[in-house]
Image (spheres, rainbow, N blue to C red):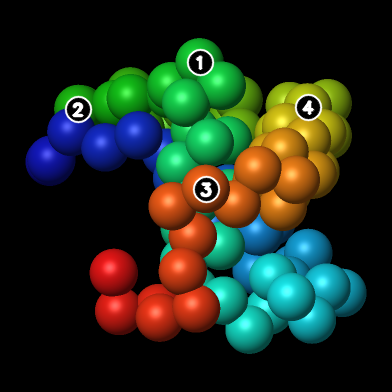
Amino acid sequence: MAIKNYLEDIVKELVATEAQKDPELKNSKTLQEDVIAYTLNHLKPKYARTRKGYILTEVELNSEQLRAEILVEVLKAIKIVKENPKGITNNDED
């Protein structure tokens, strides 16, 4: 089993959900990736390598409180990235 930060999937899911509500975010892959990177850099990673570790991590990640905390970080990241778009271009190929 590969080593993986299991928060990545949740953060990407939450950013995609928020992007549906925000046309600027929805139309910019670069902006979405900046939000994902910013969010992940401000959360404690949840890595697992073994099946047991994966199961324990999944149980923890199913906590409504943890998901709410992650959503708060996603919303903060959206606000900060949109207010400071340095490095964000109109060309999403970067």
Q: For the residues carrying marks 2 and 1, which lies nearer the camera in this image? A: 1
Q: Mark 2 vs mark 3: which is more N-terminal?
A: 2
Give whichever of 48, 22 is nearer the camera: 22
Residue indicated by mark 1 = 44
The picture quadrant where one finds residue 19 is: bottom right
In the current view of this chain or complex, which residue is farthest to the left?
1
Q: For the residues carrying marks 3 and 1, which lies nearer the camera in this image? A: 3
Kindly identify the amino acid type of the residue bearing the numbered disc 2: Arg
Q: Is residue 40 above or below residue 10?
A: above
Q: Mark 3 vs mark 4: which is more N-terminal?
A: 4
Which label number is shown at residue 86?
3
Kindly identify the amino acid type of the residue bearing the numbered disc 3: Lys
* Residue 44 left/right relative to 23: left
**Image point 26% across, 37% down: which residue?**
4
Give whichever of 56, 6 is nearer the camera: 6
Q: For the residues carrying marks 4 and 2, which lies nearer the camera in this image? A: 4
**Image point 18% across, 33% down: which residue?**
3
Which label number is shown at residue 49?
2
Q: Are marks 3 and 1 in contact (CB under 8 Å)?
A: no
Q: Are marks 1 and 4 in contact (CB under 8 Å)?
A: no
Q: Mark 2 vs mark 1: which is more N-terminal?
A: 1
Residue density around tag 1, few if under 14, some if 14–19, many if 20 or more, within 10 Å = few
In the current view of this chain or complex, which residue is farthest to the top?
44
> Rounded to the nearest whole Å, what is the CA distance between mark 3 and mark 1?
25 Å
As helix, strand or loop, the secondary structure at mark 2 comes to: loop
Which label number is shown at residue 69?
4
Image spot of residue 26 (x, y percent): 68, 79
Kindly identify the amino acid type of the residue bearing the numbered disc 1: Lys
Image spot of residue 90 (x, y percent): 50, 78
